[in-house]
Amino acid sequence: MSDLSLLKIPSMRERVSRDEWATRVDLAACYRLVHHYGMDDLVYNHISARVPGEEGHFLINAYGMTYDEISASSLVKIDFEGKIVQDSGTGYGINHAGFVIHSAVHRGRPDVACVIHTHTPAGMAVSAMKCGLLPLTQNSMFFSGVGYHGYEGPAVDLDEQKRLAADLGEHVAMVLRNHGLLAVGSTIPEAFITMYWLERACQAQVFAMQTECELPAQETVFKTNQRYKPGQRRRIGELEWAGLLRLLERRYPGFRD
């Protein structure tokens, strides 16, 4: 299918559970937010979400749709082996590299509900820096540490999955060397806000390193990071998500279809 304007994607609302539909709506919203904030890369990259109540299944985009086209019903349900469990009716399949990266994380981290992978200029720039992500700004100090995964070429080798999962470890974010960024969350809103902060931290680092910059004291970095720990503040995404959905209703209202 080359012209989605001619395609009526059938609604999945009555064909899935209430919990899955809610997940589909939030995941479609996440795709459109990544587009809105300039973190998408044509039809490439992926955001995935675990299907509630269905062990081993997750939702991902149809390969060929741009992020601003993604809707709740256009998402494809696949299993950890990359097999399509429920098609979207778009005529598109899935990107194998997306399956390799995302299934590795979902399989290795049962606590993760959502995985976001991006190729932004700032993210790719930091991924190419030997120093990695530096605690230069408050945004970067949110992360007590990030994982680092060495570049092995396009992620199509199933053998790479165990190294991806091991390098992510228990972190909420990972820099894919010479490649891009990855963020995870126990909810879709949490994953999005984590990626948003990671992206902003990378943007600030790229700007700062064009001139003289100074790292704050280590005790300040530690104290700032502790303020972001669970129990010290509200859950990430709880306050932001409602406002972000209102933004989408104004700018990209089709995400709920």
Image (cartoon, rainbow, N blue to C red):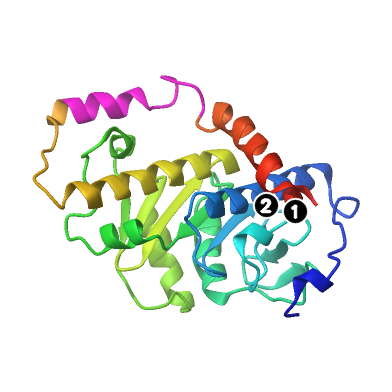
Say which residue label 2 marks: 28
Q: Is residue 200 left or right of residue 211?
A: right
First along the sequence among labels 2 and 1: 2
Pinpoint residue 170: horizontal percent, then vertical percent: 40, 46
Return the x and y of residue 218 as percentages of the image width and height. 14, 31
Mark 2 falls on what kind of element?
helix
Give the magenta part as a residue range. Answer: 220-235
Depicted 237 relative to depicted 62: above or below: above
Across the whole image, how many numbered discs are drawn on residues?
2
In the picture, measured across the screen, residue 3 lies left or right of residue 227, that is right
Identified by mark 2, the residue type is Ala
Identify the residue under disc 1: 72
Placement of 230 over or under 120, stated as above or below: above
Horizontal and vertical percent position of residue 123: 34, 57
Q: Residue at x 67, y 65 (%)?
A: 79
At 77% from the left and 48% from the top, the residue drawn is: 256
Extreme residue in the top direction: 232
Q: Can the viewer see residue 187?
A: no
Q: Secondary structure at mark 1?
A: loop
Q: Amino acid at mark 1?
A: Ala
